Image (cartoon, rainbow, N blue to C red):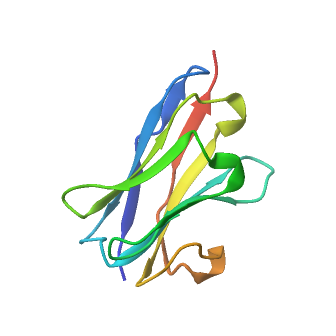
Amino acid sequence: QVQLVESGGGLVQPGGSLRLSCAGSGALDLYAIGWFRQAPGKERERVSCISSNGGSEWYADSMKGRFTISRGDAKDTVYLQINNLKPEDAAKYLCAALEWGLCPLPEREYTDWGQGTQVTVSS
């Protein structure tokens, strides 16, 4: 089991960028880490995933091109870079973990979740 804490959200203007962080209570390199988002009144949707142990990355079709997932050098953090933010990107962004997971993973497979960080996109 691992505890996850997201950070990096905030208010940004359309066209701006954010880098969200998912920090683990320990090393995350043996975990697949997924990013999700949920806007008010909408279902949670998958954004991206990075497989355990140096494995592949996955992006939802609608996220390709503006979202980049990566692991930090210290192995206890996974980042989600979001460029050219649009109003429809506004949501709570959450990360989740599954030990030895291989992406893509359905939401139900993840065993550990963070509380989320809020992203607001407005001029």
User: If the image is split into quadrants, where does the C terminus sit?
Assistant: top right
Q: How many marks?
A: 0
Identity of the residue furthest to the left in this view: 74
Question: Where residue 85 sits: x, y (%)?
Answer: 59, 30
| Residue in the image at 59% along x and 41% along y | 65
Question: Where residue 114 sits: x, y (%)?
Answer: 46, 63
100 relative position to 121: left or right = left
Identity of the residue furthest to the top in this view: 123
Q: Quadrant of residue 72?
A: bottom left
In front of the other: 12 or 33: 33
| 28 vs 120: above or below | below
In front of the other: 1 or 84: 84
Question: Where residue 80 sits: x, y (%)?
Answer: 45, 48
Q: Quadrant of residue 4?
A: bottom left
13 relative position to 77: left or right = right
| Residue in the image at 64% along x and 74% along y | 107
| 123 vs 80: above or below | above
User: If the image is split into quadrants, where does the N terminus sit?
Assistant: bottom left
| Residue in the image at 31% along x and 71% along y | 28
In front of the other: 25 or 64: 64
